Amino acid sequence: MNTRGLLDQLLKSGTDLLQGKGAAPSSPATGALGSLLSGAGGGALAAGAMGLLMGNKKARKIGGQALTYGGIAAVGVLAYKAWSNWQAQQHTAPREPAQTLDRLPQDQVEQHSQAVLKALIAVAKADGHVDARERELIEGQFRQLTTDPQLQSWLHAELNKPLDPVDVARAAGTPEMAAEMYLASVMMVDEAQFMERTYLDELARQLSLDAALKTELESQAKLAAAR
């Protein structure tokens, strides 16, 4: 199952989507969902799926660093910066450098990518906007983006699960994965929304994130959004 390629397309499309390049403007009759029906290229399809995951709210700008590093590498770079800043604050012996997405050998990237994609799908549900119709449309986009039946089955299961930060946190096989999953989640939400902020706080608790690391991850997301 290759979630890395799909995740990379989704994250890269987030940049174009936020710049108005990812999908055709929606009409009053179809709303944001109508934009999914436009465009035949993978970029347009990915932007459509990302747009549905984001919902109608203003998502955090995955732009900034994503424009520089691109796709999943951006998540790794930002998570590494947050991790390094956090380590510098500790009064313990230096630890090994964080093995984030941008620094992993190829055979380990898939596990991290799957965990981050799981986190993105879950956080999209935090504001309650992903209803049965959105799930159906998102799955339609995913089916066009990947022909892997195993990945399609996994995506279907993740989209149809009830929101559960405990289940999401189980995917974090390493502390670095936990940091990446939380960072990607923060980049997707509007923290001013009570439901989303509540979900993020519970996800951080279930991921066993140190409070100072949690703050650093949120700071990196804000810095990226400001660029």
Image (cartoon, rainbow, N blue to C red):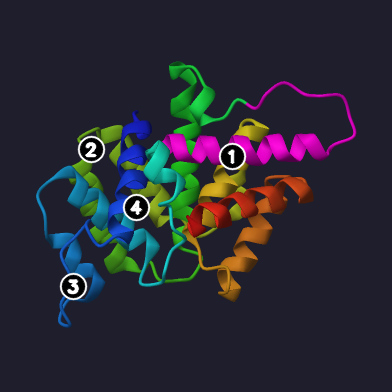
Q: Are marks 1 and 4 in contact (CB under 8 Å)?
A: no
Question: The residue under label 1 is which amino acid type?
Answer: Ala
Q: Residue at x 59, y 39 (%)?
A: 79
Circle 1 sits on which residue?
79
Q: Is residue 178 visible?
A: no
Circle 3 sits on which residue?
26
x, y percent for residue 123? 50, 58
Q: Residue at x 43, y 64 (%)?
A: 59
Tell me which segment is drawn in magenta. 72-98
| Label located before the other in sequence (3 or 2) | 3
SS at badge 4 = helix
Q: Nearer the viewer, residue 203 or 162?
A: 203
Q: Determine which quarter of the picture holds residue 223.
A: bottom right
What's the magenta bit mostly, secondary-structure-wise?
helix
Circle 2 sits on which residue?
146
SS at badge 2 = loop
Q: Are marks 3 and 2 in contact (CB under 8 Å)?
A: no
Q: Residue at x 72, y 39 (%)?
A: 85
